[in-house]
Image: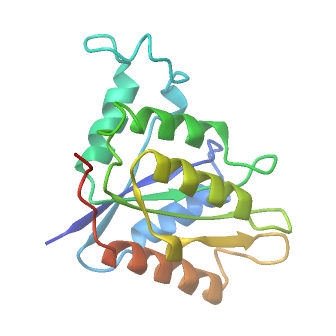
């Protein structure tokens, strides 16, 4: 049996370190685990309940919900922007949280990792993403938070950082899904 992990990358930059972290995790995933990086977050309009109605929901939002809904787990790989999560990740979580109580993340184990060129390593961004996903109904796996400053560490070449990221992924994969609230 394969465990599928939908990966939400919080940076849109083509050469983003967080994107490369997500790709490395995908490429080095253990046997039985498949990571799918969710593409097209830049195509999502800002969440607006007026357009989130059957027959009018934007195609990018439908694709996002379908891909995350089909996954067994969700992993956000994100930097920190101005002390919080990037708007693109926040917006994706807004789309995934609807319809309220039945969104694509409800009951799914959810973790957050990432790097950022600040002394704080993205801890506020990761806490905000975890809180938002939890409010949306995800089963946030607290032991999956890996925040790493990239100021003085080559995160892609540092074996200790890579081991922490691999361990976080293994913890997320081992986490139990939660039943959706009735």
Name the residue at 75% across, 67% down.
Answer: 121
Which residue in the rendered view is the most extreme toward the bottom?
A: 160
Quarter of the figure with the C terminus: top left
Height in image: 112 above or below 54?
below
- Note whether 165 is above or below 87 in the view shown: below
Q: Is residue 16 above or below residue 149?
A: above
**27 displayed left or right of 94:** left
Percent x, y of residue 110: 43, 61
Q: Residue at x 51, y 24 (%)?
A: 47
Provide residue 149's location: percent of width, then percent of height.
77, 70
User: How many badges with numbers are in the image?
Assistant: 0
Q: Quadrant of residue 138?
A: bottom left
Q: Is residue 38 left or right of residue 164?
A: left
Residue 29: give x, y in percent of width and height. 37, 74
On screen, residue 130 versus residue 70, left or right, reads: right
Please tell me which residue is depicted at 55% across the width and 23% down the height of the picture.
46
Query: Residue 144, how many percent across, how many down?
Result: 51, 73
Q: Nearer the viewer, residue 74 or 130?
A: 130
Tell me where residue 61 sits by quadrant.
top left
Residue at the image point whose x is 51% and y is 56% from the top: 76
Closer-to-camera residue (165/16)? 165
Q: Quadrant of the N terminus?
A: bottom left
């Amino acid at each position: 049996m394969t465990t599928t992990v939908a990966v939400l990358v919080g940076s849109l930059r083509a050469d983003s370190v967080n994107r490369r972290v997500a790709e490395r995790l995908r490429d080095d995933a253990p046997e039985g685990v498949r990571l799918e990086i969710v593409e097209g977050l830049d195509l999502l309009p800002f969440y607006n309940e007026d357009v989130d109605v059957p027959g009018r929901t934007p195609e990018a939002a439908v694709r996002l919900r379908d891909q995350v809904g089909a996954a067994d787990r969700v992993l956000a790989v994100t930097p920190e922007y101005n002390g919080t999560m990037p708007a693109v990740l926040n917006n994706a979580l807004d789309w995934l949280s609807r319809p309220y109580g039945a969104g694509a993340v409800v009951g799914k184990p959810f973790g957050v990792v990432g790097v950022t060129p600040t002394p704080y390593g993205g801890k506020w961004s990761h806490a905000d993403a975890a809180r938002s996903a939890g409010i949306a109904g995800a089963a946030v796996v607290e032991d999956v938070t890996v925040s790493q400053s990239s100021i003085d560490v080559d995160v892609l070449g540092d074996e200790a950082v890579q081991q922490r990221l691999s361990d976080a992924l293994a913890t997320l994969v081992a986490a139990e899904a939660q039943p959706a609230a009735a």
